[in-house]
Amino acid sequence: DAGVTQSPTHLIKTRGQQVTLRCSPKSGHDTVSWYQQALGQGPQFIFQYYEEEERQRGNFPDRFSGHQFPNYSSELNVNALLLGDSALYLCASSLAIRAGGLNTEAFFGQGTRLTVV
Amino acid sequence: GESVGLHLPTLSVQEGDNSIINCAYSNSASDYFIWYKQESGKGPQFIIDIRSNMDKRQGQRVTVLLNKTVKHLSLQIAATQPGDSAVYFCAENKGSSNTGKLIFGQGTTLQVKP
Protein backbone atom coordinates (compact mmCIF):
# COMPACT_ATOMS: atom_id res chain seq x y z
CA ASP A 1 0.00 0.00 0.00
CA ALA A 2 1.72 3.17 -1.18
CA GLY A 3 1.69 6.05 1.23
CA VAL A 4 1.56 9.70 0.26
CA THR A 5 3.79 10.40 -2.72
CA GLN A 6 5.03 13.78 -3.84
CA SER A 7 6.86 14.93 -6.94
CA PRO A 8 9.36 16.23 -7.66
CA THR A 9 11.58 15.70 -4.62
CA HIS A 10 13.74 18.72 -5.34
CA LEU A 11 13.25 21.76 -7.51
CA ILE A 12 15.18 24.93 -8.26
CA LYS A 13 13.36 27.92 -9.71
CA THR A 14 14.17 31.54 -10.45
CA ARG A 15 12.38 34.49 -8.88
CA GLY A 16 9.23 35.40 -10.78
CA GLN A 17 8.74 31.92 -12.20
CA GLN A 18 5.80 29.63 -11.54
CA VAL A 19 5.93 26.14 -10.05
CA THR A 20 3.59 23.17 -9.79
CA LEU A 21 4.00 20.50 -7.14
CA ARG A 22 2.11 17.22 -7.16
CA CYS A 23 0.73 14.89 -4.52
CA SER A 24 -0.94 11.49 -4.58
CA PRO A 25 -2.75 10.66 -1.35
CA LYS A 26 -2.61 7.43 0.57
CA SER A 27 -4.95 4.81 -0.80
CA GLY A 28 -8.44 5.29 0.58
CA HIS A 29 -7.93 8.92 1.57
CA ASP A 30 -10.02 11.68 0.04
CA THR A 31 -8.66 14.84 1.62
CA VAL A 32 -5.37 16.54 0.81
CA SER A 33 -3.73 19.34 2.78
CA TRP A 34 -0.65 21.33 1.83
CA TYR A 35 1.90 22.74 4.26
CA GLN A 36 4.96 24.95 3.90
CA GLN A 37 7.89 24.24 6.18
CA ALA A 38 10.68 26.79 6.34
CA LEU A 39 14.07 25.66 7.60
CA GLY A 40 14.01 25.15 11.37
CA GLN A 41 10.28 25.80 11.65
CA GLY A 42 7.15 23.74 12.02
CA PRO A 43 4.88 23.18 9.01
CA GLN A 44 2.44 26.00 8.24
CA PHE A 45 -0.98 25.15 6.81
CA ILE A 46 -1.55 26.48 3.29
CA PHE A 47 -4.90 24.97 2.31
CA GLN A 48 -6.95 21.81 2.18
CA TYR A 49 -8.87 20.17 -0.65
CA TYR A 50 -11.86 17.91 -0.43
CA GLU A 51 -14.28 16.92 -3.18
CA GLU A 52 -12.18 18.94 -5.62
CA GLU A 53 -12.78 22.16 -3.72
CA GLU A 54 -10.67 24.26 -1.39
CA ARG A 55 -12.24 23.73 2.00
CA GLN A 56 -10.03 25.84 4.22
CA ARG A 57 -7.13 28.20 3.69
CA GLY A 58 -4.29 29.40 5.87
CA ASN A 59 -2.63 32.80 5.84
CA PHE A 60 -1.05 32.58 2.39
CA PRO A 61 -1.39 35.01 -0.53
CA ASP A 62 -3.36 34.31 -3.69
CA ARG A 63 -0.11 33.43 -5.46
CA PHE A 64 -0.63 30.05 -3.82
CA SER A 65 -3.38 28.07 -5.50
CA GLY A 66 -4.30 24.45 -5.79
CA HIS A 67 -6.39 21.84 -7.41
CA GLN A 68 -7.76 18.42 -6.60
CA PHE A 69 -8.59 15.87 -9.25
CA PRO A 70 -11.37 13.23 -9.29
CA ASN A 71 -8.83 10.58 -8.24
CA TYR A 72 -8.09 12.71 -5.12
CA SER A 73 -4.59 13.65 -6.22
CA SER A 74 -3.69 17.30 -5.87
CA GLU A 75 -1.46 20.04 -7.21
CA LEU A 76 -0.03 23.10 -5.52
CA ASN A 77 0.77 26.05 -7.78
CA VAL A 78 2.83 29.04 -6.77
CA ASN A 79 3.06 32.04 -9.10
CA ALA A 80 5.55 34.90 -9.14
CA LEU A 81 8.01 33.06 -6.92
CA LEU A 82 9.86 34.98 -4.24
CA LEU A 83 13.07 34.06 -2.49
CA GLY A 84 11.02 33.62 0.68
CA ASP A 85 9.03 30.83 -0.95
CA SER A 86 12.06 28.57 -0.60
CA ALA A 87 10.93 25.80 1.73
CA LEU A 88 9.91 22.18 2.07
CA TYR A 89 6.37 21.74 0.78
CA LEU A 90 4.51 18.92 2.44
CA CYS A 91 1.36 17.17 1.39
CA ALA A 92 -0.79 15.35 3.94
CA SER A 93 -3.72 13.08 3.20
CA SER A 94 -6.53 11.99 5.46
CA LEU A 95 -10.14 10.89 5.49
CA ALA A 96 -12.64 13.72 5.60
CA ILE A 97 -14.18 14.39 8.97
CA ARG A 98 -17.89 13.84 8.68
CA ALA A 99 -20.33 16.10 10.51
CA GLY A 100 -20.17 15.17 14.16
CA GLY A 101 -17.31 12.83 13.45
CA LEU A 102 -13.83 12.63 14.90
CA ASN A 103 -10.52 13.79 13.52
CA THR A 104 -8.54 11.21 11.63
CA GLU A 105 -4.83 10.69 11.35
CA ALA A 106 -3.03 12.66 8.64
CA PHE A 107 -0.20 10.98 6.74
CA PHE A 108 2.55 13.12 5.27
CA GLY A 109 4.61 12.67 2.15
CA GLN A 110 8.36 13.19 1.98
CA GLY A 111 7.92 16.68 0.68
CA THR A 112 9.25 18.73 -2.21
CA ARG A 113 12.28 20.88 -1.47
CA LEU A 114 11.80 24.12 -3.44
CA THR A 115 14.72 26.50 -3.78
CA VAL A 116 14.11 29.91 -5.34
CA VAL A 117 17.22 31.72 -6.57
CA GLY B 1 -3.87 34.24 18.50
CA GLU B 2 -3.62 30.50 18.40
CA SER B 3 -0.32 28.71 18.67
CA VAL B 4 1.28 25.56 19.82
CA GLY B 5 4.64 25.93 21.45
CA LEU B 6 7.38 23.70 22.77
CA HIS B 7 9.37 24.48 25.87
CA LEU B 8 12.85 23.54 24.68
CA PRO B 9 14.31 23.66 21.18
CA THR B 10 16.86 20.92 21.92
CA LEU B 11 16.90 17.95 24.28
CA SER B 12 19.96 15.75 24.73
CA VAL B 13 19.61 12.37 26.47
CA GLN B 14 21.73 9.30 27.03
CA GLU B 15 20.82 6.14 25.18
CA GLY B 16 18.59 4.00 27.37
CA ASP B 17 17.25 6.91 29.41
CA ASN B 18 13.67 8.14 29.21
CA SER B 19 12.92 11.33 27.26
CA ILE B 20 10.20 13.85 27.97
CA ILE B 21 9.29 16.45 25.37
CA ASN B 22 6.87 19.18 26.37
CA CYS B 23 4.40 21.32 24.51
CA ALA B 24 2.11 24.16 25.56
CA TYR B 25 -0.95 25.17 23.60
CA SER B 26 -2.98 28.32 23.89
CA ASN B 27 -6.41 27.48 22.48
CA SER B 28 -8.67 25.82 25.03
CA ALA B 29 -11.07 24.90 22.19
CA SER B 30 -8.55 22.44 20.77
CA ASP B 31 -9.71 18.87 21.18
CA TYR B 32 -7.26 16.74 19.24
CA PHE B 33 -3.49 16.62 19.59
CA ILE B 34 -0.84 14.74 17.68
CA TRP B 35 2.88 14.14 18.06
CA TYR B 36 4.97 13.84 14.92
CA LYS B 37 8.58 12.78 14.44
CA GLN B 38 10.54 14.27 11.56
CA GLU B 39 13.91 12.93 10.50
CA SER B 40 16.25 14.93 8.34
CA GLY B 41 15.05 15.12 4.74
CA LYS B 42 11.76 13.37 5.47
CA GLY B 43 8.17 14.33 6.08
CA PRO B 44 6.59 14.22 9.56
CA GLN B 45 5.76 10.74 10.77
CA PHE B 46 2.76 10.15 13.03
CA ILE B 47 3.74 8.89 16.50
CA ILE B 48 0.66 9.07 18.69
CA ASP B 49 -2.47 11.14 19.13
CA ILE B 50 -4.84 11.97 21.97
CA ARG B 51 -8.31 13.45 22.17
CA SER B 52 -9.34 15.99 24.77
CA ASN B 53 -11.60 13.52 26.57
CA MET B 54 -8.47 11.61 27.64
CA ASP B 55 -5.51 12.57 29.80
CA LYS B 56 -3.15 9.74 28.91
CA ARG B 57 -2.55 7.41 26.02
CA GLN B 58 0.14 4.81 25.54
CA GLY B 59 1.75 3.37 22.48
CA GLN B 60 4.81 1.28 21.88
CA ARG B 61 7.54 2.90 24.06
CA VAL B 62 5.68 6.21 23.91
CA THR B 63 3.14 7.87 26.18
CA VAL B 64 1.32 11.13 25.63
CA LEU B 65 -0.05 13.08 28.58
CA LEU B 66 -2.59 15.86 28.28
CA ASN B 67 -3.28 18.39 31.02
CA LYS B 68 -6.17 20.55 29.90
CA THR B 69 -6.13 22.63 33.07
CA VAL B 70 -2.76 24.15 32.21
CA LYS B 71 -3.00 23.45 28.46
CA HIS B 72 0.07 21.27 28.44
CA LEU B 73 0.99 18.23 26.37
CA SER B 74 3.97 15.94 26.78
CA LEU B 75 5.53 13.03 24.94
CA GLN B 76 7.43 10.45 26.93
CA ILE B 77 9.78 8.05 25.16
CA ALA B 78 10.95 5.06 27.19
CA ALA B 79 14.45 3.62 26.79
CA THR B 80 15.48 6.17 24.18
CA GLN B 81 17.41 4.74 21.24
CA PRO B 82 19.72 6.37 18.67
CA GLY B 83 16.98 5.90 16.08
CA ASP B 84 14.78 8.23 18.11
CA SER B 85 17.03 11.16 17.22
CA ALA B 86 14.86 13.56 15.24
CA VAL B 87 12.78 16.72 15.51
CA TYR B 88 9.51 16.22 17.38
CA PHE B 89 6.47 18.39 16.73
CA CYS B 90 3.22 18.64 18.59
CA ALA B 91 0.23 19.61 16.51
CA GLU B 92 -3.23 20.77 17.41
CA ASN B 93 -6.56 20.47 15.69
CA LYS B 94 -9.86 21.98 16.61
CA GLY B 95 -12.42 19.32 15.91
CA SER B 96 -15.21 21.83 15.91
CA SER B 97 -13.86 23.18 12.64
CA ASN B 98 -14.13 19.67 11.15
CA THR B 99 -11.55 20.41 8.54
CA GLY B 100 -8.49 18.60 9.81
CA LYS B 101 -6.26 21.70 9.74
CA LEU B 102 -3.22 21.08 11.91
CA ILE B 103 -1.38 23.82 13.79
CA PHE B 104 2.22 22.87 14.51
CA GLY B 105 4.65 24.04 17.13
CA GLN B 106 8.27 24.96 16.41
CA GLY B 107 9.70 21.55 17.20
CA THR B 108 12.15 20.04 19.69
CA THR B 109 15.32 18.38 18.45
CA LEU B 110 16.04 15.18 20.36
CA GLN B 111 19.68 14.14 20.40
CA VAL B 112 20.49 10.67 21.72
CA LYS B 113 24.04 10.16 22.95
CA PRO B 114 25.42 6.60 22.67
Image (cartoon, coloured by chain):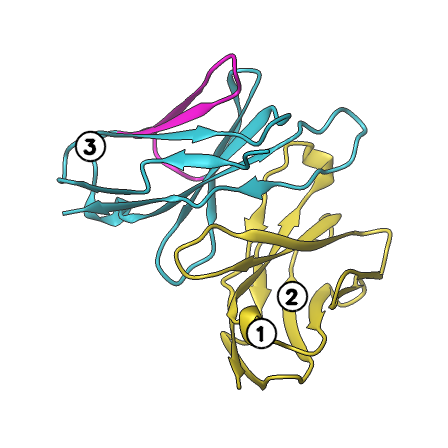
Chain colours: A cyan, B yellow
Q: In the rendered image, is residue B3 in sight?
A: yes
Which residue is identified by label 1? B7
Tell me the CA gap for discs 1 and 3. 37 Å
On residue A80, which mark appears?
Answer: 3
Tell me which chain the residue with mark 1 is part of.
B
The disc labelled 3 sits on which kind of residue?
A: Ala
Note whether residue B1 is visible. Answer: no
Disc 1 secondary structure class: loop
Residue depicted at 60% across the width and 76% down the height: B81
Query: Which stretch appears magenta?
Result: A59-78
Q: Secondary structure at mark 2?
A: strand
**Residue where numbered disc 2 is placed:** B24
* Front-lying residue, A105 or A3: A3
- Residue type highlighted by circle 2: Ala
Q: Please provide percent x and percent y for residue B49.
A: 72, 53
Q: Amino acid at mark 1?
A: His
Q: Position of residue A117 (x, y in %)?
A: 14, 47
